[in-house]
Image (tube, rainbow, N blue to C red):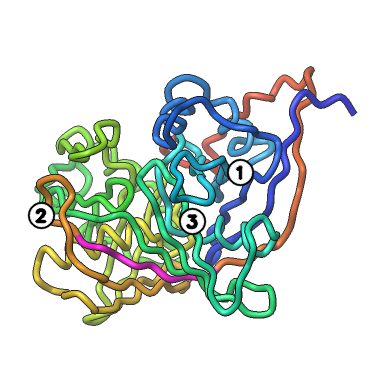
Amino acid sequence: MRWKKTLQLVDVHCEGEIGKVITGGVLDIPGKTMLDKMNYINEVDDSLRRLVVLEPRGCLQMSVNLLLPPTRPEAQAGFIVLQADKAHPMSGSNCICVVTALLELGILPMEEPSTTVVLDTPAGLVTARAQCAEGRCVSVSLDMVPSFVEHLDAVIQTDEFGTIKADIAFGGVYYALIDVEQVGLSIEPGKARELADAGVRLRGIINEQVSVKHPLIDSLDEVAYVMFRNRIDQFTWQTCTTLPPGRVDRSPCGTGSSANLATLSARGQVTPGDQLISRSTIGGEFKVELLGLTEVGDRAAVLPRITGRAWVYGMHQIGVDPDDPLADGFMLSDTWGEGF
């Protein structure tokens, strides 16, 4: 064997959403902070992202989490989310996958009944509390970064759906939250392709019509995802996050659920101590708790806690032959969707 690069990965999923974790083969990425490192991947060299996410080594319906040494003394590990379009600053389901892998593989010591792990992410510090029993992470609760509303009921003009309204909110990345009936669809497995394509089209339209910028992090300045939502009852929401270039999140989506919580707080529909259920397209659930209120710059913000589960289901190693003509990866529209 004559590989020029070798990586070790752990296979993990959170409520069906695959969040592989790179545990070996990458020493570090240039940059003083985790945000700098993410920007380096996005702006200077994204060969690692393409290697692990794109075909023939990767596939559409997954993310890959890059474990890195933390850049802040409060944290025990750092990570960056690698996805089909670029590197992203934070993801609740991927964070749950990372914590589960760190503890169940013994990379960090597991303590029963509860282990606290502080993670350094490009969006800020995230504190995770894993409930542990018999060497297993039974669940992981995340104290997410403060989440806030940028626009409520932003009016969006579309040729396909007419005039619709979207809430624009930050939950670790920026989301456009759209009540799904506005696009004539329902959140169910049989509608996943239509939801994915509609979400990708709307993301482009919304970014043309709505401006966003994080008050403290200048580089977070676009809507990353469209989340369709449907209220089941006072404390239960169906959620469907759509990801470029064209798929739906299998999990209930932690950052999107945090953004949704911020919109509910802004409308006075939840108060500190309230707990919600966020239910995915395939029926997986996250608990969503409003811990308290805070501010981010000049924005009123909420402190969300997301609780979910992940499972380790395998380990594998990948490498690149120096003569492989497809080492840079590729996408085809048959599976990668309209956004390709």
| Label 2 packing within 10 angstroms: few (<14), some (14-19), many (20+) | few
Which residue type does callout 1 highlight? Cys
Residue underneath mark 2? 153
Residue underneath mark 1? 59
Q: Which residues are magenta?
A: 302-309
| Label 3 packing within 10 angstroms: few (<14), some (14-19), many (20+) | many
- Residue 95, label in figure: 3
Which residue type does callout 3 highlight? Cys
Q: Is residue 337 left or right of residue 16?
A: left
In front here: 337 or 70?
70
The residue at the point 75 percent across, 33 percent down is 6
Tell me, yes or no, if residue 181 can be seen here.
no
Q: Which of pointers 1 and 3 lies earlier in the amino acid sequence? A: 1
Mark 3 residue element: helix
Mark 1 residue element: loop
Q: Is residue 274 magenta?
A: no
Q: Where is residue 146 drawn, in percent x and y?
A: 26, 55
Reply above or below: 270 against 331.
below
Q: Which of pointers 2 and 3 lies earlier in the amino acid sequence? A: 3
